[in-house]
Amino acid sequence: MSRYYVTTPIYYVNDAPHVGHAYATVNADALARWHRLIGDDVFFLTGTDEHGQKVARAAEEHGVTPTEWTDQLSPRFAAAWADLNISNDDFIRTTEARHHRAVQQFLTKIHENGWIVKDTYSGLYCVPCEQYYNEEDLVNGTLCPIHLRPVELLEEDNYFFRLSAFEQRLIDWYEANPEAVVPESKRNEALSFIKGGLRDISITRTSIDWGVLVPWDEQHVFYVWYDALVNYLTAIGYGQDMERFEQWWPSVHHLIGKEIIRFHCVWWPAMCMAAGIDPPAHVQVHGWLLVSGVKMSKSSLNKISPDELTAEFGVDAVRYHLLRDTPLGLDGDFSAEGITSRYNADLANNLGNLLSRVATVVGSKCGGVGPAPDPESRLASVAVEVVSEVTEAWNAGQPNLGLEATWRLLRETNAELETAEPWKADPGPGVDAVLGSALEVLRLVSVLVVPAMPATAEHIWRRIGLSGSPADQRLPGAAVWGGYPGGLDVEKGAPLFPRRK
Ligand code: MSP
């Protein structure tokens, strides 16, 4: 059995989750569910990033301690993910003792290996980014390029990670592992950053104490990114259960947004090398959800909370839209019109309509009992093609293409019904064959949509009379034409996705 370890970035808890975070988490969830469906042993990790100046300041602004603040905020992420039906196996908080321990062990190892040294640092720091910038990277020489707000001059006695010593090793590693970062444009971005020359980086702070203590010098805490990245190791037992750790590492799949490439594709692999473990095997970079061309973010006013959307459209419609309309790797514009038109076209007209039609005609022509599929149906060969395209797309981390292919099968089935018009024909073998094949498509589609719309998949499965759960089916076996046995009660029920104005 293959193992599939997938991670989201851990989210800063300085504000509540928004749809941009949901985009990342839903994609990771869908990939995790896909891999469970193909029989992989899956470990899916998400969580919250709770240290650093930004969080400490947010707590102060709210008149509470950082611990009180993070204890209030972190559960909001966990709750948002529960509402979105996210199937994470673990939820890590960087304030947990297990994480402090792993960070200290990991960084002590790097220190012992001679890659951490003490020096004085003075630089231009952006608090919302939690990073230093070189002057030439700033807008007009003064503003952070991401937040467009002034950076601050900070001077500290710090420990430095000797990142510069890893320049050639990183280049060699990327050359030997061309698939390590996808899409390729992002790999090139990481590589050209490395080739542009790496400077050593300051990895500790004395200006705040809200962080993980440096075990060999407790005046210092680790800089938040150096603490945060280690979460990917903590959760699989680094330093505690190395046997478990080695089962999952290094063949991890990190899903990350495009603004954190440098941390994940330059610093992180170098840190791993410095600690004597392999770098992460796969990093998949995604784009941003934009609102009218601007990144949805907590610092701007354009954020939409996931629960507002799910209250309006339903959980699965939101999940579907996020997965279907913004291909992983590109930016996507988020709008009420976009989600509504996708909902009407794909969910109400195609999927919902097929289920209603089939259930209604099985009611009127077959006494409510679903017939068996036609082994010779033209749809059987369409299904073979579709399943292979779907498999290829999901395996390549492209949910939008997987769903597009799935919907081709639905469209062709609706077209087939329109040609055969079983609602006009007399009951008999002809009608049975057409309806049985349409039911078989619904069975197959329930399985194929498990990653994107797990509750909808269960609903369709039950409505066509099947027992058990589509999520417990295994591909490719469950995709073989003819799995719908016939002779089951098909329930008419209310429209699955009523059309929206
Ligand atoms: N805490 C760090 C990550 C540490 S991982 C070791 C962080 N947190 S964040 O909350 O600011 O962002 C987390 C992720 O959410 C990033 O991958 C980011 O790209 C993603 N998104 C935040 N806003 C987004 C959109 N508007 N659209 C898509 N993803 C977005 O960075």
Image (tube, grey):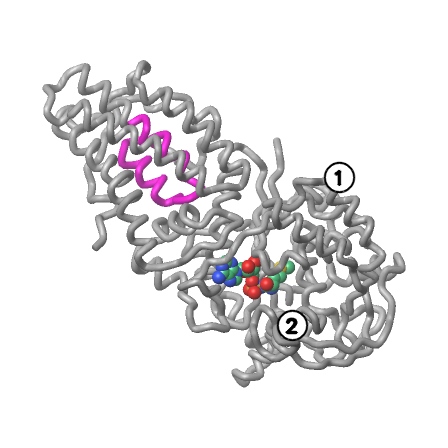
The mark nearer the N terminus, 1 or 2, is 2
Q: Is residue 325 left or right of residue 124?
A: left
Range shown magenta:
439-467
Q: How many residues crowd around disc 2 within 10 Å: few (fewer than 14), some, or many (20 or more)? A: some
The quarter of the picture where the N terminus appears is: top right
Compared to residue 422, the image places residue 38 above or below, namely below
Label ID, residue 380:
none
Q: Amino acid at mark 2?
A: Leu
> Callout 2: helix, strand or loop?
loop
Q: Are marks 1 and 2 in contact (CB under 8 Å)?
A: no
Compared to residue 119, the image places residue 7 above or below, namely above
The residue lying at 57 percent from left, 79 percent from top is 59
Compared to residue 108, the image places residue 494 above or below, namely above
Q: Is residue 104 left or right of residue 294?
A: right
Q: Which mark is nearer the camera, 1 or 2? A: 2
Q: Which residue is nearer to you in this view: 168 or 17?
A: 168
Q: Amino acid at mark 1?
A: Ala
The residue lying at 67 percent from left, 69 percent from top is 137
Label ID, residue 176:
1
Horizontal and vertical percent for residue 283?
63, 48
